[in-house]
Image (cartoon, rainbow, N blue to C red):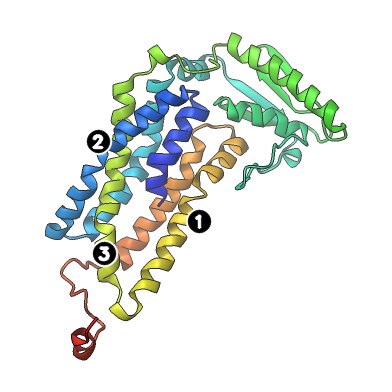
Amino acid sequence: AVIWYTGTFYGLNYLKQTLRVDAAQADLLVAVSLLVGTPFYIFFGWLSDRIGRRKLILVGLLIPVLTYFPLFHMLTQSANPALYAAVDASPVIVRADPAACSLQFDPVGKNKFDSQSCDVAKTLLSKAGVSYNAEEIPAGRAAEVHIGAQTYVAPMVENMPPAERAAAIADYNRDVSAALNAAGYPASADKNAVNAFMVIALLFFTQLCTAMVYGPMAAMLVELFPAKVRYTSMSLPYHIGNGWFGGLLPTIAFAIVASTGDIYSGIWYPVIIAGITFVVALFFLPETYKRNINHGQSDAEMAAPR
């Protein structure tokens, strides 16, 4: 599930939210990669009928573990080269009291993270796709954002009335955004600078990994469990995997990025989950492709009219 979500929803969200690619352009790039990658679900399903399900699934899990970090670096360089260059040329530092920084985990999307100085500073940078290094300061001080030689103090919003808080945050965001733009951090990706071919190729690669896992998956789930308990046995783990581990990927990834300041750190979530799944599958997942799907049923049950 995390492999599929990374290649589709997280990839699209990364282009739009982190790399600031135009929404219509990002949708088109992802749509083309999906269109090119979809036939490979059929291909790998067909291939699994000949060489087995297990080895394809294992390879499809291992490749992302080994390649996703360099892949997303390449995706940044291809989709927003100005942002990629600015990270090295003009590093950003956030100085704050770690105890005053929230874990920005918000699965329902309702929290604005605007009640603490540290959160105000980190939220703006994370949403702008800006990587930063974090440094500690004593408790009780306002968070600071350092961009080159300039220092911007985030407002101490903890005890402000709502209207005053909103105005203070708006002023702060305006000043920091202007400073980021002056330091080479673009407000949005230049449409003409996007290497569309490379972006599609990288996204297609993620689709290929997904197809290696999902192509054989339906057949393996049917073959893995006896007929009497098949529906429950395959439905429960499938929906836990997709609904919880996969569905929460964008939210968890953003929380990791906001916590660490590294726009690539969110990739640790799918990499770790895929790595654990690979190890479990390597030792415990049997090969099933020659198994009789009617196993677990008696002759009388198989002969009964339906």
Q: In the image, is 112 to the left or to the right of 188? A: right
Residue occupying image coordinates x 59% and y 41%: 255
Residue at the extreme top of the image, as rendered: 182
Residue 35 in view of the camera: yes
Who comes first in sequence, dot 3 or dot 2?
2
Tell me if mark 1 has few (under 14), some (14-19) or many (20+) residues whose alpha carbon lies within 10 angstroms of its own. few
Q: Tell me the kind of residue under disc 3.
A: Met
Q: Is residue 203 above or below residue 197?
A: below
| Circle 2 residue | 36
Residue occupying image coordinates x 60% and y 48%: 107
| Circle 2 or circle 1, nearest the eye | 2
Residue 156 in view of the camera: no
Give whichever of 264, 30 is nearer the camera.
30
Residue 74 percent location from the top left of the image: 37, 26
**Which mark identifies residue 220?**
3
Q: Secondary structure at mark 3?
A: helix
Residue occupying image coordinates x 37% and y 46%: 4
Residue at the extreme bottom of the image, as rendered: 300
Who comes first in sequence, dot 2 or dot 1?
2
